[in-house]
Amino acid sequence: MSITIREFIVAMETYGARRLNDSLSPVRHDILVPCFDISGTYFLHSGLYYIMRRGNHVPEKVMERAMSEFSEKHPGGDNFWNEEIHTIKGLLTLVAMLEGKYSKSLVEEMTNRTYKKLLNCSLIKNNYPLPFHENHAGKMDILYKTLDEYKNIVNPYGNNELDLKDPIEYLDCINVSLEKWEGKNPYTSLILSSNSCQAKYKEDENGCFYDSVVPIQKDYKNGHIHLEYYCENENGINPVDELVHFYYKFDEECYMINPNDLDLKISLQTGLAWQDNKKMLAKPVTDAQIGIMLFHLKVTIKKIKYNMVKHMMQ
């Protein structure tokens, strides 16, 4: 579980906490992070993926009560870890208890409002168009249509045909992480994850990026399909290439090369195919290679739909 800087700011603003001057991250020492005051206890972002506490000590009884709301008996669970807070719901629970305002319905209402504000982001409301669609026909055209479906599953908030529930209705089974940076090198990043799958969408000045990891069993062995679709831009505006890349790996914990691992990258702009990092050996993509890519795309779409998106739909 994790909390991005953007999520932290929106959650504390939704609660109505008093914002203090940004301070140097106690962990990274190279960035300024937001800080908020709740009854003399200071909550600041670590600069990594969790919230830290400073200032007045949180009474032990308050900490125990907050943990008990999540059936945690010691600070080593999903929500609380020693002096760290790892979820928005855990953060809002603790600050509300510190001020004597806690109720389960209040925390759920604020959590829902926080994520609705976060997800009301224009950069994730429309999935990136396929710029080189008109270049191809036949099986490549089928690949394009499948990629369009893939994008709308990886980032369901950009799929206007889906009727999604309020975030609070699926946050217990789907972890939603959104970061938005508006300074130098701006970007937006959305990550959805469940116990078995992960889907990520990112857009910055270099282009857009869709990424997913799902489990699969092949020949009675466990492995993972890692799929990437991304569009590379020139000067942050003009698309120069559009690529789809997948690799299938046995036993994700093992980083040794397995002869049964699969690796294929296809340029949708040129119609060339190659193994990752071997672009100098690229050749025109074959129907068989497109078939392999389509198979793994369809498996990925099915697994993300079943494990995540179905829980988000009305």
Image (tube, rainbow, N blue to C red):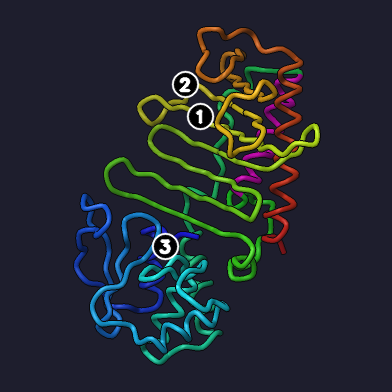
Residue 290 point in image, percent of width and height: 72, 20
CB under 8 Å between discs 1 and 3: no
* Residue 218: percent from left, percent from top: 77, 34
Find disc 3 in the rendering and name its residue.
7
Side of 137 relative to 55 (left or right): right
**Disc 2 residue type (three-letter):** Val
Identify the residue position indicated by label 1 in the image: 231
Where is residue 117? Give x, y as percent. Answer: 47, 65
In the rendering, at what x and y percent does residue 184 appear? Answer: 27, 43
**Quadrant position of residue 282:** top right
Dot 3 crowding, Cα within 10 Å, few <14, some 14–19, many 20+: many
Q: CA distance from mark 1 to mark 3?
A: 27 Å
Pick the quarter of the image with the C terminus: bottom right
Q: Residue at x 60, y 12 (%)?
A: 272
Query: What main secondary structure does the magenta stretch of the protein show?
Result: helix
Boundaries of the magenta span: 139-155
Dot 2 lies on which element? Answer: strand
User: Which residue matches tag 2?
Assistant: 240
The disc, 1 or 3, on the residue closer to the chain's N-terminal end is 3
User: Cα distance, mark 2 to mark 1?
Assistant: 8 Å
Q: Is residue 8 above or below residue 139?
A: below
Callout in the foreground (3, 2): 3
